[in-house]
Image: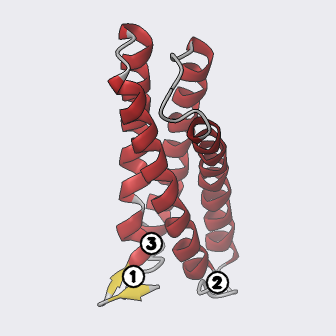
Amino acid sequence: MRLFGHPVHVMLIHFPSALFPMELVCYGVLYFTGEKSFATASYCAMAGGVALGWLAVITGALDLVKIPPYKPAVIKKALVHGTINSSVLITYTVFVYLVSKQYPDLRDASLGLLIVKAILVSTMIVGNWFGGELILKHNVALDNE
């Protein structure tokens, strides 16, 4: 999918790729300091990452269906990329839903959840590596496909 000649999925992925690690940092600061303003910052970063992440999923799915069927290895890599990052996004969506029920009286951070979020961000980085392969090696969503 393109907008004014630019691949929309590629434009959108930067938001969850930046906001989820930022959320992790804010949640970590909340855990170690107890400063409540970081609970709100964590929630806002997470909600923004989820909202724009779902737009990235939609545009990525549209790019996926445009991959020619004679490129099964590229399709497989795209499915791995989409599965990994969609799983991270689904988990963060659940977190946003649960935290939104508490808002504005957000709870203190827990070590267990901090570890889970660190694993999620690490998993997202692996998924993003597959996405980078699709763009840089296979030219998915680029003009020179």
First of labels 3, 1 by sequence position: 3
Q: Nearer the viewer, residue 66 or 54?
A: 54
| Residue in the picture at 64% in, 83% down | 65
| Residue in the picture at 68% in, 86% down | 70
Dot 1: element:
loop
Q: Is residue 92 above or below residue 79?
A: above
Q: Are marks 1 and 2 in contact (CB under 8 Å)?
A: no
Residue 39's spot in the image, x, y percent? 42, 27
Q: Are marks 3 and 1 in contact (CB under 8 Å)?
A: no
Q: Which residue is mark 2?
A: 65
Q: Which residue is mark 3?
A: 9
Dot 2: element:
loop
Residue type highlighted by circle 3: His
**For residue 58, which quarter of the picture?**
bottom right
Residue type highlighted by circle 2: Val
Label 3 and label 1: CA atoms lie apart by 11 Å
Q: Are marks 3 and 2 in contact (CB under 8 Å)?
A: no
First of labels 1, 2 by sequence position: 2
Dot 3: element:
helix
The C terminus sits in image quarter: bottom left
Residue 56's spot in the image, x, y percent? 50, 67
Instruction: Give the crowd class for mark 1: few <14, some 14-19, many >=20 residues within 10 Å.
Output: some
Q: Nearer the viewer, mark 1 or mark 2?
A: 2
Q: Which residue is mark 1?
A: 142
Q: Is residue 58 above or below residue 23?
A: below
Q: Nearer the viewer, residue 141 or 14?
A: 14
